Amino acid sequence: MNPELNGKITAMKDGVAQDTEHIFNEDFWNSLDGVTNALDNVDARTYVDRRCVFFYKPLLDSGTLGTKGNSQVVMPRMTESYSSSQDPPEQSFPMCTLRSFPNRIEHTIAWAKDLFHTYFAGPPEIVNAYLTQKDYLGSALKQFGNEKQTLETLRDYLQADRPETFDDCIEWARKQFEKQYNNAIQQLLYNFPKDSKTSSGQPFWSGPKRAPDALKFDPSNPTHYSFIVSAANLHAFNYHIKPNNDKNYITSVLDRMMIPDFKPDPGVKIQADEKEPDPNANAPMDDNDALDAIAKGLPQPKTLGDFRLEPVEFEKDDDTNFHIDFITAASNLRAENYKITQADRHKTKFIAGKIIPAIATTTALVTGLVVLELYKMIDGKDDIEQYKNGFVNLALPFFGFSEPIASPKGKYQGPNGEVTIDKLWDRFESEDVTLQQFLDDFKKKGLSISMISSGVSLLYASFYPPSKNKDRLPMKMSQLVETISKKPIPDHQKNVIFEITAEDETEEDVEIPYVMVKLQK
């Protein structure tokens, strides 16, 4: 488009993230004068924002959402950053509605997307944690709660439902169809029959509550068959089993299956309304003997060698991975249960993928707002009042501009009086000295360190026994990190970040910046 830029643009196709820091390393960031963002998700924006703060780089962030658009200016040691504030949480549907009483296709799609995670993402991650984390059942499991659910997941995915062939995957998918679209509906109608009344005498199944009907599996029904094919292939993906789309083969496996009749359980309780307390919230504690029996029956991780499951990461834009196929089929079967108008694959992808069409006019306007701030940045303006964050909505129409919020400041009492710090942009920098020297250097600043950590490793604490700290005091900070974390510092990394807790001259705990220790490489 602009021939004057020929040879002046370096295109890099790698994602900018923590796992590519060997590519987008310190030399890369230090070579930049500033950064402009054109990202489509919060995680990526937050990561780039943190990098810009760390390397003191100006950032011009912007985004569009249909007719809405915004631009934000982030200037080192002047403004707050993108991560300093958060958008309000997205509107979600009541769980009671999704679980038992959907009345819109958006409800069934949200339910189907949750089912996708429940089948193909969450359990493989739990299994892999069990196989790789030391004493997972003894420590991590109790820490996270839901012991029974987790143990049952491990039992099902490592034993009861572990497939050996694609035939097993087809059979598993068929059982899930029966469980979700027949058995669950029969149980719901057992708890709340179609002629049941509320406490006020009104019909229970009225207003937004639609009385469902259980489905009878029909392999000739395209939606029924699509559920089986997509679920079986995704289950096979979890277990590294070769996929299969052969209709004759899949149908032959389905034909020989025997599905037992379902009998509703009188002991099952179902929440009737979001405003009422969940009847399962005060359920009796899990039977420890039963939990121990499940745990003892699990295969020991060492007996499985290198066996791992492959979690599915939802990707809406690949039409061959069965993700949208599964969500479409699962949602439409649920809609069939409740006599809700079904959605085609395109609409399902649109809703499940949270796709909002881009509008060229909004994009052009926001680009203009960013360029206006870029002029100011290049001009070197150092007055925060000169910069403006922009907010627009062409549908109203609305155009608003505000001065960026200044970065937060803090204070502590040093040996020579009060010291003011910028809580966002300031940091302490140190050479790779010994722990003893590190403590002494901060003592000279009027700060008595009580704890030092790096990542998840606690490296020093004043309450540790003297014998424990004695071994660590002569170590260099880099050696200390590697010793305690039991991980080497990557070769491309030129510094290590430390978080410290300290008291100032008044013996009060103070909030102070992190410390960057520069490595000698």
Image (cartoon, grey):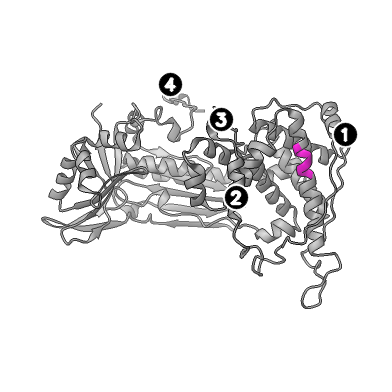
Mark sitting earlier along the chain (3/1): 1
The answer to if 492 sits in the magenta stretch is no
- Mark 3 is on which residue type? Thr
Residue 245, x across and y down, in percent: 77, 27
State the residue position of label 2: 291
> Counting other residues with Cα less than 10 Å from the Cα at mark 3, is it few (<14), some (14-19), or many (20 or more)?
few
Side of 25 where 330 appears, left or right: right
Q: Dividing the picture into quarters, in which one does residue 255 lie?
A: top right
Cβ atoms under marks 3 and 1 closer than 8 Å: no
| Residue under numbered circle 4 | 7
Badge 1 or badge 4: first in the primary sequence: 4
Label 1 crowd (10 A; few <14 / some 14-19 / many >=20): few
User: What residue is pinned by disc 3?
Assistant: 303
Q: Earlier in the sequence, mark 2 or mark 1?
A: 1
Against 350, residue 478 (above or below) is above
What kind of element bears circle 1?
A: helix
Task: Give the residue at mark 1.
Answer: 255
Query: Mark 3 or mark 4, which is nearer the start of the sequence?
Result: 4
Residue 341 x, y percent position in the rendering: 81, 52
Q: Amino acid at mark 1?
A: Asp
Q: Nearer the viewer, mark 3 or mark 1?
A: 3
The residue stretch that appears in magenta: 172-177
Q: Main secondary structure of the magenta part?
A: helix
Disc 4 residue type? Gly
